[in-house]
Amino acid sequence: MDKDSQATTKGIELAESLGIPMVIMEPVKGGSLASLPEDIGNIFKESNKDASPSSWALRYVGSFSNVKVILSGMSDMEQVEDNLSTFDSFTSLSGEEQKVVESVAQALNSRVQNGCTACRYCMPCPKGVDIPGSFKIWNEYHVYGNIKDTLRRWNEGIKEETRPKNCVECGKCESVCPQKIHIREDLKRVQREMDVLS
């Protein structure tokens, strides 16, 4: 999902070229990759009906030769057993399986609503709107479809006074956005969708 962001793949390759072993945290993206939207999860099922989405994520990072430790949080015994099973008879992803992972990543990325990279050039907003925070929650909601997590993050992370509804459409943010995002229009969409979810 994130192999091209934060120099993920390039960073692993650079570390390998320097002989530096890697410790990977959150290979399942805080659990987001464990329960994918059904249509996207079916891409994995069509390739291997017995493999969980988490096992695909673990095998993906475990397939890099210089990855020596993989740290993944687990919240119940079923997840513990699934992770143990993945590593009990570990095999690196084959070329065909790498293509399956790429298909899933493309499907997930196609659901992103705008290209906000959280560069924060739009900040501070004169009215205090948390533009990158709002877009992050909104984009991840569309990618993973997790309503419960979205509402928790919205209610705990975006205070009433920093929500998109406080935008006065001054346009200051759009004048400095390197991605040329239609911020004012997208903020309206975020607020409408979060209001409906709530």
Image: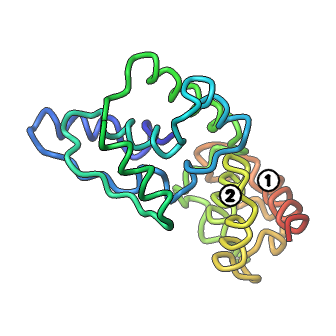
Q: Position of residue 17 (x, y in %)?
A: 13, 32
Q: Residue furthest top?
A: 96
Q: Amino acid at mark 2?
A: Phe
Tag of residue 196: none
CB atoms of marks 2 and 1 within 8 Å: yes
Give the answer, above or below, for where 4 lies relative to 139. Answer: above
Query: What is the number of callouts on the image?
Result: 2
Picture residue at 72% right of the left edge, 40% below the top: 38
Residue 185 as seen in the image, left or right of residue 108: right
Name which quarter of the figure residue 126 lies in. bottom right
Name which quarter of the figure residue 109 lies in. top right
Give the answer, above or below, for where 87 lies relative to 168. Answer: above
Residue 47 as seen in the image, left or right of residue 156: left
Q: Position of residue 174 (x, y in %)?
A: 70, 53
Q: Name the residue that disc number 2 marks.
A: 135
Picture residue at 40% right of the left edge, 17% below the top: 95
Give the answer, above or below, for where 75 lies relative to 107. Answer: below
Q: Nearer the viewer, residue 33 or 87?
A: 87
Residue 44 as seen in the image, left or right of residue 172: left
Q: Position of residue 133 (x, y in %)?
A: 63, 65
Name which quarter of the figure residue 71 lies in. bottom left
- Helix or strand or loop: what does disc 1 sit on? helix
Q: Nearer the viewer, residue 160 or 61?
A: 61
Tag of residue 186: 1
- Helix or strand or loop: what does disc 2 sit on? helix
Picture residue at 84% right of the left edge, 65% below the top: 191
Q: CA distance from mark 2 to mark 1?
A: 8 Å
Point out the image quarter for the C terminus.
bottom right
Q: Position of residue 30 (x, y in %)?
A: 50, 59
Residue 193 as seen in the image, left or right of residue 138: right
Callout 1 crowding tier (Cα within 10 Å): few <14, some 14–19, many ≥20: some
